[in-house]
Image (cartoon, rainbow, N blue to C red):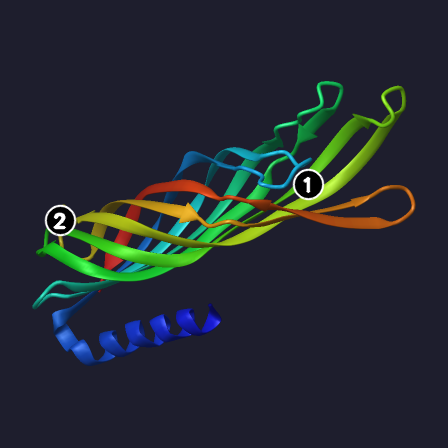
Amino acid sequence: MKRIFITIAFFMLSTGLFAGEAWNNHLGFGWRLPTKLTLHSETKGYENLKMSWQTGLNLSYTGVLMSNGFSVRAIVDQCFTASNLEIADPDSRISSFPGFAGDVLAGIGWAPVRSKKFFFGFYGMLGLDFAAFYYDTDYFWPSDSKVRRTQNVYYASFLPGVNATFIWTPTGEHFSLFATTTVAYSCPTKIFYEYDDGTGNVKTSCITRGGTKIMPAVGISWRF
């Protein structure tokens, strides 16, 4: 995966360097609108990881060859996220704290609309989705014995998807507004759990079948 991102980054840089004035760049800074994601467990005895919202900073780059519309796109989201485990045992109680989530995506596409005022492009994207949480849990084992436990929960998965981006430059040549949406699939992966059971640290994991992730954002961009 690292080699893929290095290749894409080198390709983007090379294209921008040799395209001259025919190549336009847009650097974006915006807000990732709140969306949710649930990763369903495929392993017996483990609960689904339900992220009720994810929102935060959106950083992006868009480059386009004005002569034919060939375009490249890169996105980095850094988000706060709230989550909860869907507990199967009615006697167990869990309180969640906000965690951190993010995604890194890069891809290529085509911009059928590309003028000094309006830009619209769509892309095939590939990247990574990741999140980490801290849980403070009360559960009963056996049923008459209350146990207090904290645990860390985290995962990382491949993230293929598609993206559409619209950029509007109301006045001048540099300052623009943008809106973008990515629809991607957080691929099946492992969710890792780390906790202290009183005798030492315990590490376990479960398999998830993944889930669809929608990532809209709005913001401002600078064209050069």
Q: CA distance from mark 2 to mark 1?
A: 46 Å
Q: Is residue 220 above or below residue 91?
A: below
For disc 2, the marked residue is 171
- Residue 211 position in % (x across, y down): 45, 41
Indicate which disc, 2 or 1, sits on the residue closer to the N terminus: 1
Q: Residues within 10 Å of mark 2 (few under 14, many from 20)?
A: few
Which of the 4 image quadrants contains residue 110? Answer: bottom left
> Residue visible at 74% across and 41% down?
151
Q: Which mark is residue 134?
A: 1
Residue 136, compared with residue 183, is above or below; it is: above
- Image coordinates of residue 92 in percent, x first then y, are 74, 23
Q: Label 1 is placed on what type of residue? A: Tyr
Determine crowd level at label 1: few under 14, some 14-19, many 20+ residues with C-alpha closer than 10 A: many
Left/right placement of residue 56 relative to residue 21 reads right
Q: Name the residue rendered at 12%, 63% in the picture.
A: 69
Q: Amino acid at mark 2?
A: Thr
